Amino acid sequence: MNEKNKVGYIVSLIEKLEPKEIREIFMTLWRNADGLSEGLTADDCIEIFASALKGSSDFTYDLLKDTCHDYGVGTMTETFALLPRETYDKLFSECLKGGIPPETRLDTDALINLIMLEKVSNVEASIRKGCLKATHFMGSDKKYIYDSGIDDEEILWEIDDFRANYPKTWWTVEQVIYSY
């Protein structure tokens, strides 16, 4: 019997079992079959991880925080910050009052959201590439982003064009000017 036929035969036997019996087999294999993890590719593991939870209520801050901890990833990295809801809400409300902490780093989408806030008039933000730093003074009329660089060059960006021009870019917010 070739490998494909063996797998098909085993699956056909398992499919005849009750759900609790299938669960028992799966969990036993997952926990105790040493060769299982060695036979899985990284993509296999991602597929299992991404599809194993049953619903949105399964995603909690504690689960994500513990998962980050289990894999040695901090809850704040170059690409994301995982915050409890109450911390996020406090930070967001402080931002709306003009209390953005100095040196706050935002990705391009978050910067666009900040620029689009009703009470925000202008944002001074910089990007750093190695030892070079480029500062931008930006405002918006909710349709376009008005961007003035330190060289006084003014660019009128459509929002999607701005997003496309600065993918995966992290901005350091130097100051926010509010209109009241």
Image (cartoon, rainbow, N blue to C red):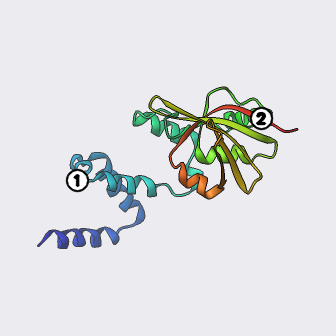
Q: Earlier in the sequence, mark 2 or mark 1?
A: 1
Q: Residue at x 41, y 35 (%)?
A: 70
Residue lying farthest to the left in this orientation:
1
Picture coordinates of residue 66, whole percent (x, y): 48, 36
Amino acid type of the residue tagged 2 in the rendering: Ile
Q: Residue at x 34, y 71 (%)?
A: 15
Neighbor class of circle 1 (other Cα within 10 Å; few <14, some 14-19, many 20+) is few
Residue lying farthest to the right in this orientation:
180
Picture coordinates of residue 3, whole percent (x, y): 15, 68
Q: Residue at x 71, y 38 (%)?
A: 123
Q: Which residue is mark 2?
A: 177
| Quadrant (top left, top right, bottom left, bottom right) of the C terminus | top right
| Quadrant (top left, top right, bottom left, bottom right) of the N terminus | bottom left
Picture coordinates of residue 166, whole percent (x, y): 54, 48
In the image: residue 115, left or right of residue 80: right
Calculate the distance from the C-alpha at mark 2 to the C-alpha at mark 1.
56 Å
Q: Residue at x 46, y 28 (%)?
A: 131
Amino acid type of the residue tagged 1 in the rendering: Gly
Q: Which residue is mark 1?
A: 39
Query: Which of 141 and 22 lies nearest the eye of the viewer?
Result: 141
Query: Which of 32 and 85 lies nearest the eye of the viewer?
Result: 85
- Element assignment for label 1: helix
- Element assignment for label 2: strand
Q: Mark 2 or 1, which is nearer the eye?
A: 2
Neighbor class of circle 2 (other Cα within 10 Å; few <14, some 14-19, many 20+) is few
